[in-house]
Image (cartoon, rainbow, N blue to C red):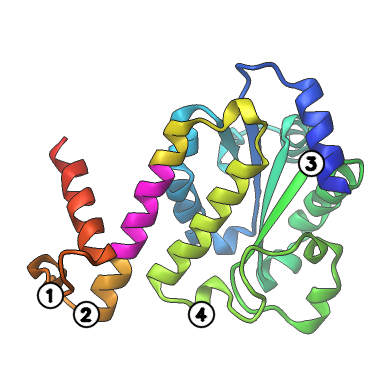
């Protein structure tokens, strides 16, 4: 229901050349995941489909709360990095309240990622009503690098699918597919070890060999 209301409001408010603003909410203790999220969202950022805001955008001397409220006011999507650090942060507490209030009004679409294991008390928060991209039993911190990439790629795909049709370009879908090949190749290297993928021991028709060829082609251009 809230998702349908959000999309209706979003389409009514947006012009054809306006990008969607994504607000990233996280604890500074989980900062290591921010760079991973930025990397996986690069195709959408390069295409101009979205802009990404997080606390690094706050300049020295700026009012912290005012900057956050201003960004949330103009954001259509929020990504929450859930962890014990997140729910124990006083700064995040006020931020999360604003996020959930706007979502309840149908003006904000929420995606959440479970970054690390959570205490059972934290699971009662209404943030978890917004269906984390990954399982609560499989936080990012418990996954391999390639498994983490797959989860984050699902986040990027979910954000793209939430955009109005005019912002879902074929070029973005193509770049997203290249990211999937990157994840496939990373998985192959983990499973086999070393650089043996390059010897094509998996066979010419295997997806990992195809991923290797496509990635090699990207580097040549």
**Circle 4 residue:** 142
**Circle 3 residue:** 108
Mark 4, other Cα within 10 Å: few <14 / some 14–19 / many ≥20: few
Q: Is residue 113 above or below residue 178?
A: below
Name the chief secondary structure element in magenta: helix
> Which label sits in the foreground, 2 or 4?
2
Q: Are marks 1 and 2 in contact (CB under 8 Å)?
A: yes
**Circle 2 residue:** 192
Q: Residue at x 36, y 61 (%)?
A: 183
Mark 1, other Cα within 10 Å: few <14 / some 14–19 / many ≥20: few
Residue 136 % position (x, y): 67, 76
**Circle 1 residue:** 201
Q: Residue at x 39, y 70 (%)?
A: 145
Q: Residue furthest front?
A: 205
Q: Split into 4 quadrants, where in the image is the C terminus?
A: top left
Q: Residue at x 73, y 36 (%)?
A: 76
The residues tagged by marks 3 and 2 sit, at their Cα atoms, a distance apart of: 43 Å
């Amino acid at each position: 229901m809230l998702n349908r209301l959000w999309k209706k409001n979003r389409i009514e408010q947006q012009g054809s050349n306006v990008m969607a603003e994504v607000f990233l909410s996280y604890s500074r203790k989980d900062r290591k995941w921010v760079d991973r999220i930025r990397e996986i969202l690069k195709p959408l950022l390069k295409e101009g489909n979205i802009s990404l805001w997080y606390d690094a955008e706050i300049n020295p001397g700026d009012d912290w709360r005012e900057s956050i409220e201003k960004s949330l006011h103009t954001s259509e999507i929020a990504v929450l990095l859930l962890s014990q650090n997140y729910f124990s942060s006083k700064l995040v507490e006020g931020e999360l309240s604003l996020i959930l209030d706007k979502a309840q009004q149908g003006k904000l679409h929420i995606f959440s990622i479970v970054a690390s294991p959570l205490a059972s008390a934290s699971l009662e928060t209404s943030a978890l009503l917004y269906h984390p991209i990954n399982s609560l039993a499989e936080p990012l911190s418990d996954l391999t690098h390639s498994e983490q990439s797959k989860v984050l790629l699902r986040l990027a795909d979910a954000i793209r699918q939430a955009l109005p049709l005019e912002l879902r370009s074929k070029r973005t879908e193509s770049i997203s597919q290249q990211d999937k090949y990157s994840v496939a190749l990373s998985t192959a290297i983990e499973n086999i070890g070393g650089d043996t993928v390059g010897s094509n021991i998996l066979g010419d028709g295997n997806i990992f060999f195809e991923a290797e060829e496509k990635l090699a082609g990207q580097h040549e251009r």
